[in-house]
């Protein structure tokens, strides 16, 4: 099948791109970095082609499957990695995001299928497809932004540990300062949470308008609000209590862990009903 072939070729190109990015991090090679970025562009174009084939080749919205949601998330991570490649002294961030994007791409191919099977959702979404597309698009971009925030938070913890123990190497010298890492992480998380709130607001308003208020008590909705509470705690600690960057960076990683757990709960949710197809 052409779609599967393009997707598989994209995975191989993605893997090569990741190897060059890692090589740049280890050996500080401009050639490796440029080659990795070029291959990532090709991989992203392949993902765009697959998304387009799904969009125009399906009789219904392709975003109604877990496969396509994760595909869009992987594409968002690829584009974000390319953008971060141009940020000075942030060579490690594109590599880490590429690892995340590649992992999502491979797991998506191994565990799911490209066969179109819509979500087992309430009928109201089929009468409000525009809202559905907006809801899922905002949610996937939000996930990418929160992932970026977590990557910078992880870099903050790594750099803090190396500085604390006075362990210097070339990689440390190529990282942004702790202050800049904290700012990057905060900005990405703030943007991601705003998009997540907008996505949830669209879903809640649609439920209320269509008389599906009982679904507000679904496990998926409850766990999503728990995620929001985790990030609310992050903002309170950072902006109001003025806690250390070390503590808030840990909370950023905890928030991402809850995001991933929340996604895995889709299979037990009547709100989405994603069961691996």
Image: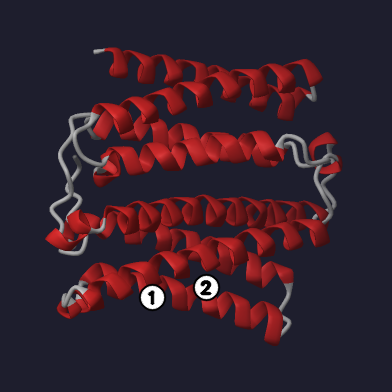
Which residue position is annotated with label 2?
231
Q: Is residue 96 visible?
A: no
Q: Is residue 78 visible?
A: yes
Q: Residue at x 55, y 61 (%)?
A: 192
Crowd class of label 2 (few under 14; some 14 to 19; many from 20; radius 10 Å): many
Q: Secondary structure at mark 2?
A: helix
Looking at the picture, does residue 63 appear above or below residue 256?
A: above
Q: Which mark is residue 176?
A: none
Q: In the rendered view, does 144 fall on the left or right side of 209?
A: right
Q: Position of residue 53 (x, y in %)?
A: 33, 25
Q: Position of residue 102 (x, y in %)?
A: 47, 31
Q: In the rendered view, does 209 fall on the left or right side of 238?
A: left
Crowd class of label 1 (few under 14; some 14 to 19; many from 20; radius 10 Å): some
Looking at the picture, does residue 171 appear above or below residue 19?
A: below
Looking at the picture, does residue 180 appear above or below residue 26?
A: below
| Foreground pick, 237 / 206 | 206
Q: In the rendered view, does 223 fall on the left or right side of 212?
A: right
Q: Position of residue 152 (x, y in %)?
A: 67, 53
Quarter residue 8 falls in: top left
Which residue position is annotated with label 1?
226
Q: Secondary structure at mark 1?
A: helix
Q: Earlier in the sequence, mark 1 or mark 2?
A: 1
Q: Which quadrant of the figure contains the N terminus?
A: top left
Q: Residue at x 25, y 34 (%)?
A: 111
| Foreground pick, 202 / 128 | 128
Quarter residue 55 falls in: top left
Q: How far apart are the two marked residues, 1 and 2, measured between alpha carbons?
A: 9 Å
Q: Position of residue 256 (x, y in %)?
A: 48, 59
């Amino acid at each position: 099948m052409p779609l599967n072939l393009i997707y598989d070729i994209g995975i191989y190109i993605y893997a090569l791109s990741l190897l060059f990015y890692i090589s740049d991090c280890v050996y500080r090679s401009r050639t490796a970095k440029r080659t990795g970025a070029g291959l990532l562009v090709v991989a992203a174009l392949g993902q765009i082609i697959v998304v387009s084939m799904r969009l125009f080749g399906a009789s219904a919205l392709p975003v109604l499957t877990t496969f396509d949601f994760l595909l869009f998330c992987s594409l968002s991570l690829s584009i974000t990695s390319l953008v971060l490649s141009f940020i000075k002294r942030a060579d490690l961030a594109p590599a880490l995001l590429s690892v995340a994007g590649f992992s999502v791409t491979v797991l998506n191919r191994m565990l799911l299928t490209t066969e179109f099977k819509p979500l087992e959702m309430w009928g109201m979404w089929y009468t409000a497809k525009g809202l559905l597309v907006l809801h899922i698009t905002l949610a996937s971009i939000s996930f990418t932004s929160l992932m970026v925030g977590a990557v910078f938070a992880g870099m903050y913890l790594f750099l803090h540990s190396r500085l604390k123990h006075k362990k210097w190497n070339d990689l440390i010298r190529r990282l942004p300062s702790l202050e800049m890492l904290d700012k990057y992480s905060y900005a990405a998380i703030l943007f991601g949470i705003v998009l997540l709130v907008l996505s949830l607001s669209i879903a809640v308003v649609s439920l209320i308008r269509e008389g599906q208020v009982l679904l507000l008590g679904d496990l998926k909705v409850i766990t999503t609000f728990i995620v929001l509470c985790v990030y609310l705690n992050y903002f309170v600690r950072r902006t109001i209590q003025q806690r250390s960057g070390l503590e808030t960076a840990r909370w950023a990683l905890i928030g991402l862990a809850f995001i991933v757990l929340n996604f895995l709960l889709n299979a037990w949710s009547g709100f989405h009903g994603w069961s691996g197809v």
